[in-house]
Structures are given as structure tokens and as C-alpha cells.
Image (cartoon, helix red, strand yellow):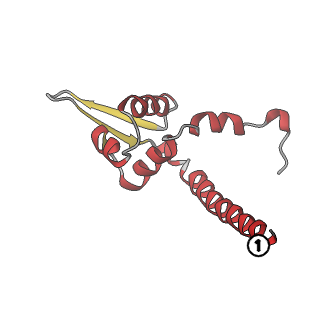
């Protein structure tokens, strides 16, 4: 990797992606398409309404997702991934693969340590 550490933009990228629920939100929208708020909430039982709203707003501010409000009663709000947001798909896939390998690595290391004792 020929990058100058002082010019590294990994921190910028992580600033957008970091958040317990952001990757999960993005994966739902990438795989399942447009979702209503209530559908997203239902698909992530551990998230609070306040946290989901906060993380959706942050992703919207970065032009990663799009929020559409329909003028009806009760209000209908839908979220979808933007074309720009779709550029995150290979990054999320790579992070998922690395996370899977890292988890296996940690388990193997733990087994080795147990066997040595």
C-alpha cells in the first residue's frame, strides 16, 4: 500500500461507517432495497427508536442513504441506499470477510492456548 500516513483517509471512512447499527442498516438496504422505518426497526430488534433515527440521519447527511417522506396520515417514511452509497458494498463485503477470518483466527488461537496448558 503506497499511502502517505499523514494523508490517510481511513479515519474519514470509518467516521461514516462506525456505529453499532450502521453496517447492519446498510446491509439491509443493499440486500432488501427500500425499507420503511418500522421494517428496519423490526429487522433489528436490539436497536432503540432513538438510536435508529440518529444513525439513519447520520447516513443521510453523508448522502449514503435517501429518506423519502410521503404526505399522508399516518406519515410514511422510506429509506433507500443512494447510488453513491452503493459504492460501500465491496468495502462492507471485504470487512465481513475479514471479520469472519479474524473470528476464526481468535478461536484457533484460543484452542491452541488451551491445548498448551
Corner quadrant of residue 35: top left
Give coordinates of residue 107: x percent, y percent. 67, 65
Corner quadrant of residue 16: top right
Against 94, residue 115 (above or below) is below
Taking the spot 43% from the left edge, 31% from the top edge, the residue there is 51
Taking the spot 35% from the left edge, 32% from the top edge, the residue there is 49
Between 36 and 19, the one nearer to me in the picture: 19
Give coordinates of residue 52: x percent, y percent. 41, 34
Between 72 and 27, the one nearer to me in the picture: 27
How many numbered marks are there? 1
Taking the spot 16% from the left edge, 29% from the top edge, the residue there is 74
Between 41 and 85, the one nearer to me in the picture: 41
Q: Which residue is mark 1?
A: 115
Taking the spot 57% from the left edge, 52% from the top edge, the residue there is 92
Between 21 and 3, the one nearer to me in the picture: 21
Q: Is residue 48 left or right of residue 38?
A: right
Q: Is residue 49 left or right of residue 83?
A: left
Against 117, residue 99 (above or below) is above
Which of the image's four quarters has the C terminus? Answer: bottom right
Q: Is residue 36 left or right of residue 82?
A: left
Corner quadrant of residue 12: top right
Q: Residue furthest bottom?
A: 115
Q: SS of the residue at dot 1?
A: helix
Against 51, residue 88 (above or below) is below
Q: Residues within 10 Å of mark 1 (few under 14, many from 20)?
A: few
Q: Residue furthest front?
A: 117
Give coordinates of residue 25: x percent, y percent. 44, 44
Give coordinates of residue 45: x percent, y percent. 36, 45
Amino acid at each position: 500500500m503506497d499511502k502517505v500516513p499523514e494523508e490517510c483517509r481511513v479515519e474519514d471512512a470509518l467516521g461514516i461507517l462506525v456505529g453499532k447499527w450502521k453496517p447492519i442498516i446498510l446491509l439491509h438496504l443493499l440486500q432488501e432495497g427500500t425499507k420503511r422505518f418500522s421494517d428496519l426497526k423490526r429487522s433489528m430488534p436490539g436497536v432503540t427508536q432513538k438510536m435508529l433515527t440518529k444513525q439513519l440521519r447520520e447516513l443521510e447527511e453523508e448522502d449514503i442513504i435517501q429518506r423519502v417522506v410521503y404526505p399522508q396520515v399516518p406519515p410514511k417514511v422510506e429509506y433507500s441506499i443512494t447510488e453513491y452509497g452503493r459504492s460501500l458494498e465491496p468495502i462492507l463485503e471485504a470487512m465481513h470477510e475479514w471479520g469472519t477470518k479474524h473470528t476464526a483466527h481468535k478461536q484457533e488461537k484460543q484452542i491452541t492456548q488451551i491445548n498448551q496448558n
